[in-house]
Image (cartoon, helix red, strand yellow):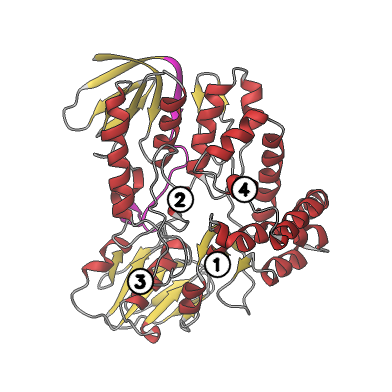
């Protein structure tokens, strides 16, 4: 068994592990050993489906020290007019470049791909069988805790009968014979991506059957643009959130206000969503999805059989001969349990800001470098719970607003947030033109409604738990 030595042992070289390591390298002189089971850094991006893209602007993704975005605005496609969304291939190449041209040349990083971490500071090479034991002077970082499942490695939890043409989303691009119809199973981000890709390839809406177990509230991607041109949308949406919370008389009234103000969207205005995962969508994508009329809303799939058809929780749909079933039922995040971020010699990165696990990892690394006391670190890194049900939006917002307030009390943190490219909105807000009356009116709305929103938020949460 080969002996290694480092300050930080990071398990996982996905986006979270890379973002954490980047800040440790930039802000300290610590040494790092990174272990990962994939052949290249990037985590689940190594096995992503061919047409995957980010759902958020590229400016918000990657490691703090290196831009992923070229600052371009998409000129064509369903994201037209908005900040570009990096493709899976671009993200994979980006992380490989960061590892090869930044991390390793620093002389303070050792990288062990194709290795299984077996626990107790030990790992084993899958290719050579060689075993390693690491002496860790500071912390072990479990960058795999927010485990992301992807279609290519997902095993469906329903029965698939003989004669059913069933493929993971990754194989959709390998179709050589036109099916009689496409049956997309899954109403989350991957299901949306599958339907949009098929429509962009010229498939008629009538030839797409979409099985949606739960409708979801979606975020308007225009509200996530980190550029001054979209200040009224991005900051306006935050002001609208505070107003909706402050004025809401009930949870249903809250969601009605969030929708009417453009904060949340839904595909079918006649269906009340029960799910919220934080997926973003552009106006053009929403328009395209609304062209789909053959949407099955009978709960989850239990089985698919040529004779019996598609059996769901509350009904059955006939099987159509020649149909191609596309599996998009994998849940992106499966681990919803919250652990302390800092616990002795273990750091478990989790979301400390909604929708942004990569920013969260970078922030946690900064807190690790800047502060000594574990209690203080955990106070600054309270976990923002990952949403699943629609009402989880409230708990997520409560935790996020509390974190934002706590951070605002720390001068050094305010400065770091302003300068960190993964944050985006702190700089946008601080640098706004103070002579712009429209922008200043938005800021005033945010300030005036912040405290009433917090008070009402707790009341609404209490009504759920009562």
Q: Report if residue 145 lies within the magenta region.
A: yes
Residue 235: x and y in percent read: 65, 57
Considering the numbered disc 4 on the image, is that residue within a helix, a strand or a loop? loop
Foreground label between 1 and 2? 2
- Tell me the distance, in whole angstroms, between the alpha carbons under discs 1 and 2: 30 Å
Residue 280 among magenta residues: no
Q: Is residue 170 above or below residue 31?
A: below
Query: Tag 3's secondary structure?
Result: helix
Label 1, residues with CA under 10 Å away: few <14, some 14-19, many ≥20? many
In the picture, residue 327 is in which quadrant?
A: bottom left
- Asked whether, in this view, residue 414 is left or right of residue 156, the answer is right
Q: Nearer the viewer, mark 2 or mark 4?
A: 4
Disc 3 to disc 4, C-alpha distance:
38 Å
Residue 53 lies left or right of residue 37; in this view the side is: right
Disc 4 marks which residue? 431
**Magenta-tinted stretch:** 137-156
Q: Residue at x 61, y 63 (%)?
A: 233
Q: Position of residue 372 (x, y in %)?
A: 59, 17
Q: Image height check: is 335 above or below 127?
A: below
Q: Which mark is residue 332?
A: none
- Tell me, yes or no, if residue 108 can be seen here: yes
Q: Nearer the viewer, mark 2 or mark 3?
A: 2
Residue at 67% of width from left, 61% of height from top?
A: 236
Label at residue 197: 3
Q: Residues within 10 Å of mark 3 (few under 14, many from 20)?
A: some
Of 200 and 131, nearer the camera is: 200
Q: What residue sits right under mark 2 in the picture?
A: 59
- The disc label shown at residue 214, or none: 1
Look at the numbered discs 4 and 1 and tell me whether their residues touch, using CB distance below 8 Å: no
Assign the N terminus to one quadrant of the image. top left
Q: Earlier in the sequence, mark 1 or mark 3?
A: 3
């Amino acid at each position: 068994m080969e002996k290694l030595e480092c300050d930080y042992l990071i398990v996982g070289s996905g986006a979270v592990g890379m973002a954490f390591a980047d800040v440790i390298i930039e802000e300290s002189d610590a040494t790092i050993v990174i272990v990962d089971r994939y052949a290249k850094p990037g985590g689940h991006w190594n096995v992503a489906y061919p047409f995957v893209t980010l759902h958020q602007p590229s400016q918000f993704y990657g490691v703090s020290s290196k831009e992923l975005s070229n600052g371009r605005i998409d000129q064509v496609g369903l994201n037209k007019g908005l900040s570009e969304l990096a493709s899976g291939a671009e993200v994979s190449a980006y992380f490989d470049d960061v590892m090869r041209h930044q991390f390793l040349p620093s002389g303070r990083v050792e990288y062990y791909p194709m290795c299984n971490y077996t626990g107790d500071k030990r790992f084993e090479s899958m290719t050579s069988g060689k075993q390693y034991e690491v002496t860790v002077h500071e912390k072990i970082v479990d960058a795999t805790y927010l485990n992301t499942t992807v279609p290519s490695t997902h095993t469906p939890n329903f029965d698939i009968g003989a004669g059913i043409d069933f493929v993971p989303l990754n194989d959709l691009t390998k179709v050589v014979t036109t099916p009689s119809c496409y049956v997309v199973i899954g109403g989350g981000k991957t299901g949306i991506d599958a339907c949009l890709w098929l429509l962009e390839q010229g498939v008629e809406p009538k030839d797409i059957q979409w099985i949606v177990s739960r409708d979801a509230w979606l975020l308007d991607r225009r509200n996530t643009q980190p550029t001054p041109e979209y200040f009224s949308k991005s900051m306006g949406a935050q002001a609208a959130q505070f107003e909706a919370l402050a004025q809401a008389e009930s949870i249903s009234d809250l969601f009605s206000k969030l929708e009417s103000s453009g904060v949340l969207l839904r595909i079918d205005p006649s269906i009340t969503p029960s799910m919220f995962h934080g997926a973003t969508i552009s106006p053009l994508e929403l328009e395209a999805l609304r062209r789909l009329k053959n949407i099955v809303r009978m709960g989850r799939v239990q089985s698919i059989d040529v004779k019996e058809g598609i059996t769901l929780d509350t009904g059955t749909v006939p099987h159509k001969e020649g149909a191609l079933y596309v599996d998009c039922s994998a849940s992106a995040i499966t681990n919803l349990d919250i652990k302390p971020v800092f616990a002795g010699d273990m750091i478990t990165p989790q979301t400390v800001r909604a929708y942004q696990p990569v920013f969260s990892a970078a922030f946690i690394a900064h807190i690790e470098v800047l502060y000594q006391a574990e209690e203080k670190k955990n106070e600054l890194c309270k976990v923002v719970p990952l949403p699943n049900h629609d009402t989880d939006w409230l708990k997520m917002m409560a935790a996020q607003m509390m974190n934002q307030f706590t951070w605002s009390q720390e001068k050094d943190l305010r400065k770091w947030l302003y300068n960190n490219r993964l944050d985006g909105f702190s700089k946008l807000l601080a640098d706004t033109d103070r002579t712009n009356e429209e922008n200043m009116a938005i800021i005033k709305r945010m300030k005036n409604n912040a405290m009433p929103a917090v008070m009402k938020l707790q009341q609404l949460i209490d009504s759920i738990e009562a």
